[in-house]
Image (spheres, rainbow, N blue to C red):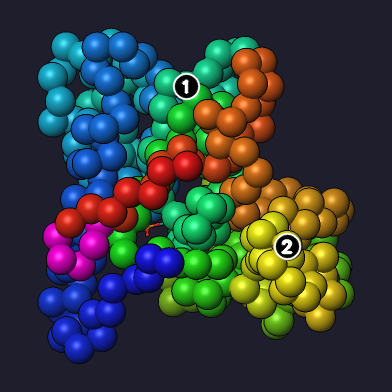
């Protein structure tokens, strides 16, 4: 089982620099391996700090090729990145349902052994899910801190859940009933007083759960998985969350990836590959 490399003995400033370098390495490698300038036309651009390097890597490619492409953002931040890089801007609202993006690149807060993800730490997840499911291939870019055996092991602040503001309190109780450990409405302080408001004018709840199981854990005799004692498999919890009235979308990306769905079948949320920049400067790739 691959584990995050420990850097705890390194001074904070050096650690921050290592993290930036690792994000950059992952992003450049992912773009090199998965964006085909000769063939690809429609490209999704996710949100977060690692995606900044994805856009840098794309902007450094041959302009004749990238000017023939359209780049689809997952929110206000990525729209700004695409525009600042002078790349052609698309809009998912104008993309026919039958049309697929060739590839999309996005970050994650945590990635498990089966490439299930937690996303939404940067308050974007709903449009990210739309873009991921609209793409043939979703490629995840991250640094070594995101590598995890099971979701909820490294990322302790909880699963980000986008909610309709008027339903937020009811959703908090429903989450507690499912076993969430102290779910909270995300607050904007120190930069904004009151709840964080998403690009879709919603609020966010961060809902910590015990680490989420994979189907094989149950087969291997681990108890729980369907909510018993607050223990869930990723799929069972994700299916349960989306049934709660007031939850617009949650930050679990799970189920199938773009290579697993049949032609005409949609709904692939998982990446086909995840690129992790490591503390030693290398890039580790987890393929589906
Ligand atoms: O889901 C996201 C935004 O809501 C990001 O992809 C996720 O938070 C990772 O961000 P970063 O690349 O800054 O670590």
**Residue at image mark 2:** 219
Based on the displayed image, in which of its 4 quarters is residue 43 positioned? top left
Q: Secondary structure at mark 1?
A: loop
In-image side of 239 versus 52 (left or right): right
**Residue at the spot x=25%, y=49% of the render?**
26
**Residue at the spot x=51%, y=60% of the render?**
112
Looking at the image, the residue that sits furthest to the front is 220
Frontmost residue, 214 versus 253 = 214
The main secondary structure of the magenta stretch is loop
Residue stretch rendered in magenta on the structure? 277-281
Return the mark for residue 125: none
Residue 254 seen anywhere in this rendered image of the structure: yes
**Cα distance, mark 2 to mark 1?**
36 Å
Against 95, residue 277 (above or below) is below
Q: Secondary structure at mark 2?
A: helix
Q: Position of residue 14 (x, y in %)?
A: 13, 77
Q: Position of residue 38 (x, y in %)?
A: 24, 12
Magenta stretch encompasses residue 278 = yes
Magenta stretch encompasses residue 107 = no
Return the mark for residue 101: 1
Residue 49 seen anywhere in this rendered image of the structure: no
Question: Is the residue under label 1 in contact with that under label 2 (CB below 8 Å)?
Answer: no
Based on the displayed image, in which of its 4 quarters is residue 208 positioned? bottom right
Looking at the image, the residue that sits furthest to the bottom is 9
**Residue at the spot x=44%, y=76% of the render?**
190
In-image side of 16 versus 214 (left or right): left
Against 223, residue 72 (above or below) is above
Frontmost residue, 161 versus 239 = 239
């Amino acid at each position: 089982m691959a584990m995050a490399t420990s850097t705890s003995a390194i001074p904070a400033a050096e650690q921050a620099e290592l993290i930036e370098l690792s994000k950059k390495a992952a992003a450049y490698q992912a773009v090199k391996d998965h964006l085909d300038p000769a063939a690809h036309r429609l490209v999704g651009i996710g949100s977060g700090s690692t995606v900044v390097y994805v856009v840098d890597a794309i902007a450094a490619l041959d302009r004749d090729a990238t000017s023939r492409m359209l780049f689809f953002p997952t929110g206000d931040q990525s729209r700004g990145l695409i525009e600042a890089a002078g790349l052609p801007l698309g809009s998912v609202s104008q993309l026919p349902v039958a049309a697929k993006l060739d590839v999309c690149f996005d970050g994650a807060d945590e990635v498990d052994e089966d490439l299930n993800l937690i996303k939404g730490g940067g308050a974007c997840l709903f449009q990210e899910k739309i873009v991921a499911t609209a793409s043939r291939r979703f490629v995840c870019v991250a640094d070594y801190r995101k590598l995890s055996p099971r979701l909820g092991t490294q990322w302790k602040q909880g699963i980000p859940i986008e909610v309709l503001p008027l339903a937020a309190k009811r959703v908090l109780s429903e989450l507690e009933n499912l076993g969430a450990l102290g779910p909270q409405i995300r607050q904007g302080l120190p930069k904004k007083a009151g709840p964080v408001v998403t690009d879709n004018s919603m609020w966010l709840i961060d809902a910590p759960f015990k680490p989420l199981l994979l189907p094989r854990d149950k087969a291997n005799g681990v108890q729980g998985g369907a909510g018993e004692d607050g223990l869930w498999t990723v799929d069972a919890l994700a299916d349960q969350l989306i049934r709660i009235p007031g939850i617009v979308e949650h930050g679990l990306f799970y189920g199938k990836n773009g290579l697993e769905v049949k032609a005409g079948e949609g709904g692939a949320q998982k990446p086909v590959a995840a690129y992790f920049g490591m503390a030693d400067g290398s890039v580790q790739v987890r393929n589906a």
